[in-house]
Image: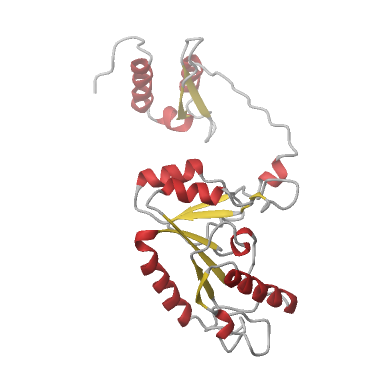
């Protein structure tokens, strides 16, 4: 997984593009079995030809080809290799912006200093697998999180792919299958869930106190509000309470203080 389109502020676009080109020139292309190799081949010969067609269409539609991966000798040798390719001045009317190429082709879209403009532009895409934002602004992160339309979000990371146990899926045309779930969510949707609540009052704790050695090791007592409107509780491990009366008294005093029952505790 990698970014296909980068929306960058006009003010820093030139510096970013130069750094991208410099880094791309250092990438080693070849057989992925070799440890020094960073960029392997595309999936098959047909896809290599399709990628080269996308590169040509970008040129014909008016994008600026900053780094031409077709000139890398690996691209012209054996195997289905395509060198890193970078386009600048891409618009949302171009095929290289509209389609998922699944190849090392990066499209740079320049925007003003408005994050809102970049988000609106991104949301126009029919694909929405993932989106990332690079910033040190908390307000920008909040705006991005609330308004971007994508299945996986990242902040200051290049690939927003979560661990397998997190539920996620792509949005829009990036969604594949018939279930927006992953990890345990893929099984739990078959279940009918039920929440249960049980009230154990102070008198229960007092009975436990009389049976010091009989209390189970992990038995838990709940101190609940007597109010019918509020059901707030404090959880106390019963084993601790039975062995330490002062500890039990401390929690009782907190309970009384919270619900304004009896005298306020003195610490």
In front of the other: 219 or 57: 57
Percent x, y for residue 47?
71, 74
Query: For residue 68, what is the image quadrant?
Result: bottom right
In front of the other: 118 or 206: 118
Q: How many labels does the image show?
A: 0
Q: Is residue 153 above or below residue 101?
A: above
In front of the other: 173 or 188: 173
Percent x, y for residue 152?
56, 51
* 58 with respect to 190 (left or right): left
* 88 with respect to 94 (left or right): left
Percent x, y for residue 36?
52, 84
The residue located at (51%, 9%) in the rendering is 228
The residue located at (68%, 85%) in the rendering is 79
In front of the other: 78 or 157: 78
If the image is split into quadrants, where does the N terminus sit?
Answer: bottom right
Q: In this view, does 141 lie above or below 134?
A: above
The residue located at (75%, 39%) in the rendering is 190
Q: In this view, does 176 lie above or below 5?
A: above
Percent x, y for residue 197?
59, 22
User: Colour scheme in the image?
Assistant: secondary structure
Query: For residue 265, what is the image quadrant?
Result: top left
If the image is split into quadrants, where does the C terminus sit?
Answer: top left
The residue located at (56%, 83%) in the rendering is 29
Q: Farthest residue in the left direction?
A: 267
């Amino acid at each position: 997984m990698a970014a296909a389109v980068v929306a960058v502020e006009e003010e820093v676009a030139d510096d970013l593009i130069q750094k991208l080109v410099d880094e791309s020139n250092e990438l080693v292309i070849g057989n992925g079995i070799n440890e020094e190799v960073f960029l392997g081949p595309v999936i098959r010969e047909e896809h290599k030809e399709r990628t080269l067609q996308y590169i040509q269409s970008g040129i014909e539609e008016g994008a600026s080809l900053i780094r031409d991966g077709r000139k890398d000798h690996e691209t012209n040798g054996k195997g289905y290799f395509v060198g890193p390719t970078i386009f600048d001045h891409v618009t949302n009317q171009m095929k290289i912006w509209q389609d998922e190429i699944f190849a090392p082709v990066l499209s740079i879209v320049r925007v003003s200093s408005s994050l809102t403009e970049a988000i609106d532009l991104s949301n126009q895409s029919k694909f929405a697998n993932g989106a990332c934002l690079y910033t040190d602004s908390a307000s920008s992160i909040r705006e991005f999180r609330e308004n971007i339309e994508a299945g996986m979000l990242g902040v200051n990371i290049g690939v927003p792919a979560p661990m397998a146990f997190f539920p996620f899926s792509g949005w829009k045309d990036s969604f594949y299958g018939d279930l927006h779930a992953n990890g345990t969510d893929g099984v739990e949707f078959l279940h009918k869930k039920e929440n249960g609540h049980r009230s154990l009052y102070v008198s229960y704790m007092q009975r436990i106190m009389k049976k010091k050695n009989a209390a189970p090791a992990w038995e838990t007592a709940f101190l609940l509000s007597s109010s019918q409107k509020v059901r707030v509780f404090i959880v106390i491990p019963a084993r601790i309470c039975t062995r330490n009366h002062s500890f039990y008294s401390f929690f009782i005093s907190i309970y009384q203080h919270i619900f304004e029952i009896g005298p306020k505790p003195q610490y």
